[in-house]
Image (spheres, helix red, strand yellow):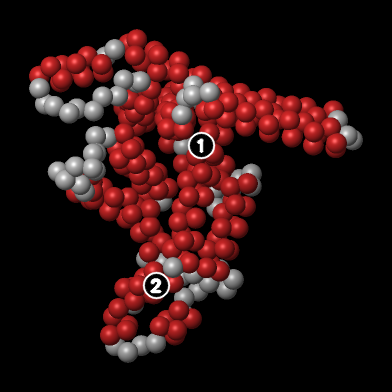
Amino acid sequence: MSASHFNPGFELLGALVLWRALGNWDSTTEHNTGHYWRAVWASWAMVVAWLFAPFWFNPVALQWQKLEDDFIEWKRWMARDGSAAEKSWLAWHHEECQYIYATRSSVKMLHVLAPGLRYLVTFLGLINPITKALKTTSTTTLVATETDLFDIEAYTMGLARVATILAFIFVPIGAAKLGDGLLERHAEDIPVLRRLFSFVAAIVCFSAIAAPLAYGLTNVHEILRALVAGFYLLAFLVTVAFAAGLTLPVVTKLCWCYDYGVGLLLQMALFVLSGLGFVNEIQVRSLFNAAFSRGLRIADLMVSIPHKSD
């Protein structure tokens, strides 16, 4: 389900959001009003189908109590280190990736590496600091834009800029985690020292982001762009590691972080839909339309559905 529905759905969702944020969609003019949605409404429909179709055809999937139970069980599944795919994310991940390591044919390597090319192209597009909106369709403008696409100096400057922003964000966080681990090991009997270190580390991490913003060295849009670029770079490196057959612990950890993040997003979306009571009513009505037309009571149908506790 994850490989066939959720992963493509979230990948397409990210592409559509990036296209909306960075594309030339000038909503202030009458010509371009709604042009984005006219161009991509079918893709958004595909995203909704990929992400929510497995839940839509389950008549109890949007019940609040069922969602709470599933969410608790999902968190346990993500945290456990069992040997069966039904009991542990780690076992499921190894089972999903087994086909990659089973054979080392060049065709399979190209198949695994193909998504990485998309990630690399997206990363290069995000780090390029030269972003020009085409306001004319003259030959001069088209040639200038094509030259910018192959400007190695521009990509180098963009990469350095993104690396600096990411270093300001994650180096203090990494140092804080390392220091907390050392204190936990060597100063376990001094909780005051650990609390003081956590307070100072939080101030340093906040200042590392707030100071460049306050002095105008960067802006929120650029920070978000750097974070997204770093995400696509990591996705490309993970794909390369899979294609090379490397089973590194850091690759598994990155995959776990990605699955945990998108899982939380999907769970929050389901809780929102469950909170809107009419969504569940529409779902039940659409699934049991034939039963309603024959005058059957929906309560009798719902009781006949087996629950987890049974």
Q: Which mark is residue 177?
A: none
For the point 15% across and 20% down, the residue is 142
Dividing the picture into quarters, in which one does residue 239 lie? Answer: top left
Q: Amino acid at mark 2?
A: Phe
Q: Which mark is residue 255?
A: 1
Given residues 116 and 195, the one toward you in this image is 195
SS state under label 1: helix
For the point 26% across and 24% down, the residue is 132
User: From where the camera sits, is residue 94 visible?
Assistant: no
Image location (x, y in percent) of residue 136: 13, 27
For the point 37% across and 66% down, the residue is 57
As drawn, the residue found furthest toward the front would be 215
Image location (x, y in percent) of residue 37: 23, 48
Dividing the picture into quarters, in which one does residue 171 lie? Answer: top right
For the point 40% across and 18% down, the residue is 158
- Estimate how packed mark 1 is, as few (under 14), some (14 to 19) or many (20 or more) residues with alpha carbons within 10 Å: some
User: In the image, 304: left or right of 29?
Assistant: right
Image location (x, y in percent) of residue 68: 57, 63
Q: From the viewer's perspective, is residue 144 above or below residue 3?
A: above
Mark 2 or 1: the one toward you? 2
Q: Which residue is mark 2?
A: 278
Q: Amino acid at mark 1?
A: Cys
**Labelled pair 2, 1 in contact (Cβ < 8 Å):** no
User: In the image, 45: left or right of 97?
Assistant: left
Given residues 11 and 36, the one toward you in this image is 36
SS state under label 2: helix
Dot 2 or dot 1: first in sequence order is 1
How far is mark 2 from mark 1, CA to CA? 35 Å
Q: From the viewer's perspective, is residue 77 above or below residue 149?
A: below
As drawn, the residue found furthest toward the bottom would be 295
